[in-house]
Amino acid sequence: MRYRIQRVFGRLSAFSRALLLLLAAAGLLLTGGRVTRALPAFAPQSQPLIALTFDDGPRRSTTTQLLDGLAQRGVPATFFLIGELVPDNEDIVARMEAEGHQVGIHTWDHVSLTGLNARDFYSQVERTGTLLYQILGHGGFALRPPYGMVDNGVKKRAGAPIILWSVDPTDWDDKNTQRIVEQVVSQAQDGDIILLHDIYPTSVEAALQIVDALHAKGFLFVTVEELARQRQVPLEPGEVYCDFRP
Ligand SMILES: [Zn+2]
């Protein structure tokens, strides 16, 4: 077989050979970018782990303030972004990844993905993913469907793990920082995924207080991707994950 390939390859013109090699290299680059994105070396953690996740951004004023606070505390988080809010905020998206946060997709303009036909689904998810690809240079973004609404169509088309949550203080409701902090800190367990929204100043303040309170309780904050890795749970496309409790 190898001999035959060599013979066929040998018969091609120099131009065709160059073209084939170029295509093969491009293929490697493309797939390499998707599947081999470097994660930090695996170091198993013994302390309780928790993931902060933020939906509905980016919003320059609040998201920047949050990134500053997380950077001061050395805490990574996961951001599920709205595609139509990304233009003019590309620097914020790049900053997220540069500072160790995970970036994911929360649709183009915040519609429920259930019941959508393929075209509408892809114009919500793929369109956002393409924009993020242009900024970050890789694909493979986890999906958080708005309202946590998932059906078989969403699972079938997601092409990425579907990340929901296990702690939801409904921070958008009364926007009461103290209540949000108390609710999350009293509920938080090892392996939880916390849902917040980085578009409200009250939620940003709450998030930073939550970090300080859970640090005092011995929690280590990690991205969703890292949480799954620590728990040795493979993230499969179209599968739904709400927590990674032991
Ligand atoms: Zn949302």
Image (tube, helix red, strand yellow):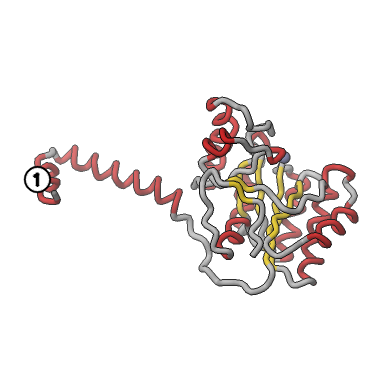
Residue 64 versus residue 142: which sits nearer the camera?
142
Check the picture and name the quadrant holding the C terminus.
bottom right
Q: Is residue 71 left or right of residue 217?
A: left
Q: Is residue 30 left or right of residue 146?
A: left
Neighbour tally class for label 1: few under 14, some 14-19, many 20 plus, Cα within 10 Å: few
Q: Residue at x 57, y 30 (%)?
A: 121
* Depicted 4 relative to depicted 222: above or below: above
Q: Amino acid at mark 1?
A: Arg
Quadrant of the rendered image holding ligand 1: top right
Q: Position of residue 227 (x, y in %)?
A: 61, 61
Asked if ligand 1 lies within 8 A of label 1, the reply is no
Q: Residue at x 19, y 42 (%)?
A: 17
Q: Is residue 92 visible?
A: no
Residue 134 versus residue 1: which sits nearer the camera?
1
* Depicted 46 relative to depicted 200: above or below: below
Q: Position of residue 66 (x, y in %)?
A: 75, 54
What SS does tag 1 mark?
helix
* Depicted 127 relative to depicted 35: above or below: above
* Depicted 241 relative to depicted 228: above or below: above
Residue 6 versus residue 233: which sits nearer the camera?
233
Q: Position of residue 24 (x, y in %)?
A: 29, 45
Q: Is residue 236 visible?
A: yes
Q: Is residue 9 left or right of residue 42?
A: left
Q: Position of residue 168 (x, y in %)?
A: 78, 50
Residue 27 picture quarter: top left
Q: How many dots with numbers?
A: 1
Q: Which residue sits furthest bottom?
A: 46
Q: Residue at x 60, y 45 (%)?
A: 162
Identify the residue position indicated by label 1 in the image. Answer: 7
Q: Residue at x 19, y 37 (%)?
A: 16
